[in-house]
Image: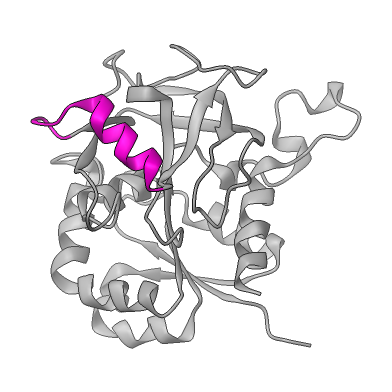
Amino acid sequence: MPSPPRVLILRAAGTNCDEETEFAWNLAGARAERVHVNRLIESPARLRDCQILTIAGGFSYGDDIASGRILAHQLTLALGDAIRGFVDRGGLLIGICNGFQVLVKAGFLPGPGLPAATLTHNDSGRFEARWVWLRGEPCNCRWIEPGELLRLPSAHGEGKFVAAADADAATVFSALRGAGCVALTYCDANGNPAAYPDNPSGSQFGLAGACDRTGRVFGLMPHPERCVLPTQRPDWTGISNPVADGLRLFRRALESLR
C-alpha cells in the first residue's frame, strides 16, 4: 500500500488554525505535520519530503502591519526560491484565510504574468464571521469542481479581493477568469451571485478563492478546515445526509496527486 501523501502546515507567531488544519488533512488521508516557519527557513530541504505545503489561518505576527504582510515578506526573502521550486516539481500549495493573504502579498497569487491584486479591509470596516455559500468556477484549481456549491465558515477583517490601485477591476477579473484562476465566488444557496452579507467582505466580483495558472497554488478566505465533520455545520440536525464540504476539498487535492 502506498504511503499517505505528506503535508507540511506552516505556522508562525499568531497562527491559530494549524491544529484544525492538521486534523483536517489527517482525516482526509494525508500524513500532516505542523512546522514553524523558522524551522523551515533553517532547513528548506524539508519541502522535498512533502507533497503539499499549507499556510494556515489565524493572525500571523498579529497582523501588526497588514494581514499576512510580515509572513509574506519573510517567505519572499528566505523561502521564495524553495517554494517556487516545490511548486515547479508538482507540489501543491494552499493558503487559508491569513494564508491566502500571505500568498497574495508574497506574489504567489495570482502568479507570474497575471495582473496584480491584493486583499484589503472589508467594506463593513469590521471583522465578519459567518457561514457563506461558495460556487466553484471553471478553473485550473486542483481543489475545486466547477459548478459545485459549498458551505463553509468565514472569519476575517481583511478579505476583500481587489485589483491593484492603478488597474481596472473588470479588466483584472476578466484576465484572471480567462487564465482559469478564479476558483471560488460568493453566492447564495441557489448559486446566484451574492451581495453583502453573503459576500462578507465586499470582494470585487465576489471572488472568494483564486489559483495560479498551474492550479497547484490555491488560496481562499473561508475556512475548509472548520467543516470537515458533518456535525460542524450549524444546520446538520435538519439535513438527512449532511456533507462536510471542507473535507471534500482536502480529499480532492489528495486525489489529484494520485
Q: Residue furthest front?
A: 178
Q: Is residue 124 above or below residue 47?
A: above
Q: Residue furthest left?
A: 166
Q: In the displayed structure, does residue 53 sit left or right of residue 80? A: right
Rendered residue at 27%/55% (across/down): 111
Q: Nearer the viewer, residue 80 or 138?
A: 138
Question: Is residue 169 inside the magenta stretch?
Answer: yes
The quarter of the rendered structure image containing the C terminus is bottom right
The quarter of the rendered structure image containing the N terminus is bottom right
Q: Position of residue 47 (x, y in %)?
A: 39, 80
Q: Can residue 120 be seen in the rendering of this structure?
A: no
The magenta-colored residue range is 164-179
* Magenta stretch, main secondary structure class: helix
Q: Is residue 54 above or below residue 123?
A: below
Q: Is residue 3 above or below residue 119?
A: below
- In this picture the colour scheme is one colour
Rendered residue at 56%/52% (across/down): 20
Q: Position of residue 64 (x, y in %)?
A: 16, 41
Q: Position of residue 199 (x, y in %)?
A: 45, 19
Q: Position of residue 27 (x, y in %)?
A: 70, 61
